[in-house]
Image (tube, helix red, strand yellow):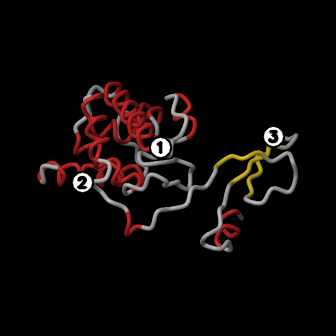
Amino acid sequence: MIGGALCLQAPSGQADIYRYIDSNGVLHFTNTPTSSNFRLYIKERPRIPARTLQPHRYDRLISAASKRHGIDFPLLKAIIKVESDYDPRAVSKKGAQGLMQIMPATGKALNITNAFDPWENVMGGTRYFKQLFNRFEGKLPLALAAYNAGPEVVDRYQSIPPIPETEAYVQKVMKYYYAFRKTDL
């Protein structure tokens, strides 16, 4: 229902999403609130046209996060490539935000106040990935799967979970990681 409403909107318009929980505990989402019970849930940021995205624009920031948290620069670059294609205003269908596609609850736990701020997003996302990397004892595919599907899901399977999206995600990140390592970014 929301997707249809969003598609009808003019390209230059904003499509903020509002949420309301009724007395039965049912969640209602809309981009056009009909009562004062609705509260802003996601504030849409205008997308940067793909032709203006610059993959090297955030290299200094990625390098700083790499050094601060001990995660390889080409790996961080690969994660950001797959997560947002270097779009700091990216918002996924599930609500993940920014360059490293931080979910709002994860952002809150990481004390990220603005997931669309590249510095906060990359520093917080890298810190979170480092926690996952340590949790899964340096097993990169498991840490990547946990970044995509959540650590509890990886714990349950004790391997990359049999979720097509997660399996494809790990493969894509690894493909870019190896490619970026070869190009000496």
Relative to residue 176, is residue 131 drawn left or right?
right
Give the label on residue 176, or none.
2
Residue receiving disc 1: 117
Which numbered mark, 2 or 1, is in the foreground of this view? 1
Give the label on residue 88, or none.
none
Q: How far apart are marks 1 and 3 (CA)?
A: 33 Å
Residue, x 45% and y 67% (percent of image)?
49
Q: Which of marks 2 and 1 is nearer the N terminus?
A: 1
Provide residue 184's location: percent of width, then percent of height. 12, 49
Disc 2, SS: helix
Q: Is residue 73 above or below residue 53?
A: above
Q: Distance between the residues labelled 2 and 1?
A: 24 Å
Q: How crowded is mark 1: few (under 14 residues within 10 Å), some or many (20 or more)?
A: some
Residue, x 50% and y 46% (percent of image)?
116
Provide residue 109's location: percent of width, then percent of height. 53, 28
Which numbered mark, 3 or 2, is in the foreground of this view? 2
Q: Earlier in the sequence, mark 1 or mark 3?
A: 3
Residue receiving disc 3: 25
Of residues 118 and 130, the one drawn nearer to the viewer in this rendering: 118
In terms of image quadrants, where is residue 54?
Answer: bottom left
Provide residue 82's location: percent of width, then percent of height. 35, 54
Task: Tell me the amino acid under the disc marked 2.
Answer: Tyr
Task: Tell me the amino acid under the disc marked 1.
Answer: Asp
Of residues 123 and 128, the one drawn nearer to the viewer in this rendering: 123
